[in-house]
Amino acid sequence: MRSLRHRAISTLALALITAGASPVAGEKKAMVVHLPEAPIESMSRLAEGVTALAEYIQGSVPELTLEVKAFRKSDDAVQFLAGQGDGTALLVCDAAFLLDLPDDYEVAHRFVRQGRETGRKIVVVKKDSGLESLASLKGRSLTMTLGTSEPVTRFLAESVFRSEIDPKRWFGSIVQETDDFTAIAAVLYGRTDAALVAEDNPLLAKHLDKDLASIYASPPVSLPVIAVRPGAFAPGQLSALASGLDGLSSRPEAEPIRAVLAIDGFRRVDEGSRRAADLLAGSSVRRELEIAIPSIPLPPIPAEFQPLPPGAVPFVVGVELPEVVIPPELVDSGLKPKTEATPPAKKSGREQ
């Protein structure tokens, strides 16, 4: 009897350990949303879109229950994820937000908008401000939605600003706002000198070349992404999720989602680019300047234009010597040259 009881306890303990090691089908998981660059001015409209997306995903993945957790501030989202532990399954966020998170999140799909997976970030100022370039913004204030952690700052410096400036040292102050609409409004109403925003923002399009002017455009950077935490999914759920996201661009029932989020759909990210650093175009890699050489054959150079040998090139070296003033006291010192004694003058006959 004792042996049977001991075996039952051991079996129960093993079951509890196994349950803790693998996700339980049907267990509610969080879908964290942070989209400060979304071209949707109404927060209620954005909430409608991401809620519909969560319902679509639940219908595509068997026994997956999601709870949407949307955040306007990146700091709040990071704090929630830190305290949530293993309770998060999905992230719908701007790509740069992943730089502040642990390595157990992998990028699975990326937003596609108007046929593009990337977009530019631009710096805008008031049109009558007299500011015309990044150089003119030295010491001025900048508004943006990105955080100011070390990885994000490095991404800004190297990928957004092409290593031309270090934002933390260049700008007098950096103000973090909750979304691009608020960042643009800060410039329009004179609260800050400039704003770094996505190029497809509708408020920007309304005021560009009227009240606002663009003085800088970044290289293409990633549009928002969907990242997964693989450990939160039961076997088979990840492949079902990928198939569902692949089909969102063509399924009729997903049309409201596409309309609200202003996207064509999602595109699967290659296995080799699932890390955030790869997705963001290797922001830690810096290239030196290169000289482009045309590949077409050039005509021969005439003899009179052939380069001269090094020995036949005349050159002049000029050396500027400082003027040395000799103090008068050295000149009038006792170091005078000796002179012959002057013979006494002869006396005249009268004086004799």
Image (cartoon, rainbow, N blue to C red):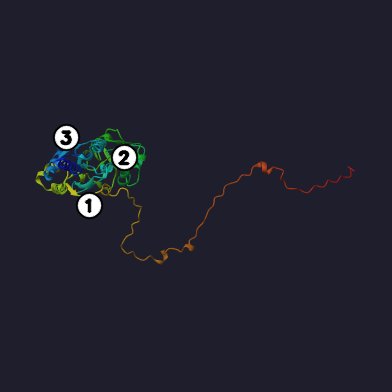
Work out whether mark 3 precedes mark 2 in sequence or the reverse, and give the earlier one. 3
Q: Of helix, strand and loop, which one carries label 2?
A: loop
**Residue 42 seen in this snapshot:** no
Return the residue at label 3: 44
Q: Residue 149: give its label.
A: 2
Give the spatial CA distance, label 3 vs label 2. Answer: 29 Å
Q: What residue type is labelled 3?
A: Ser
Q: Of helix, strand and loop, which one carries label 3?
A: helix
Locate the C terminus and report the quarter of the image it occupies: top right
Locate the N terminus and report the quarter of the image it occupies: top left
Q: Which amino acid does label 2 sit on?
A: Ser
Question: Alpha-carbon neighbours of circle 2 within 10 Å: few (<14), some, or many (≥20)?
Answer: few
Q: Where is residue 281 in the image (x, y as percent from the top left)?
A: 28, 49
In this rendered view, identify the residue nearer to me: 88 or 234: 234
Which of label 1 and label 2 is nearer to you?
1
Q: Of helix, strand and loop, which one carries label 1?
A: helix
Q: Quadrant of residue 334?
A: top right
From what the image shows, is residue 221 above or below residue 173? below
Q: Position of residue 24 (x, y in %)?
A: 16, 42
Q: Residue 271: give its label.
A: 1
Q: In this view, does 57 lie to the left or right of 343?
A: left
Which of label 3 and label 2 is nearer to you?
2
Q: In this view, does 308 lie to the left or right of 27?
A: right
Work out whether mark 1 precedes mark 2 in sequence or the reverse, and give the earlier one. 2
Q: Which amino acid does label 1 sit on?
A: Glu
Disc 1 + disc 2, Cβ < 8 Å = no
Farthest residue, direction left: 252
In this rendered view, identify the residue nearer to me: 51 or 63: 63
**Residue 79 seen in this snapshot:** yes
Give the spatial CA distance, label 3 vs label 1. Answer: 35 Å
Q: Where is residue 228 in the image (x, y as percent from the top left)?
A: 20, 45
Work out whether mark 3 precedes mark 1 in sequence or the reverse, and give the earlier one. 3
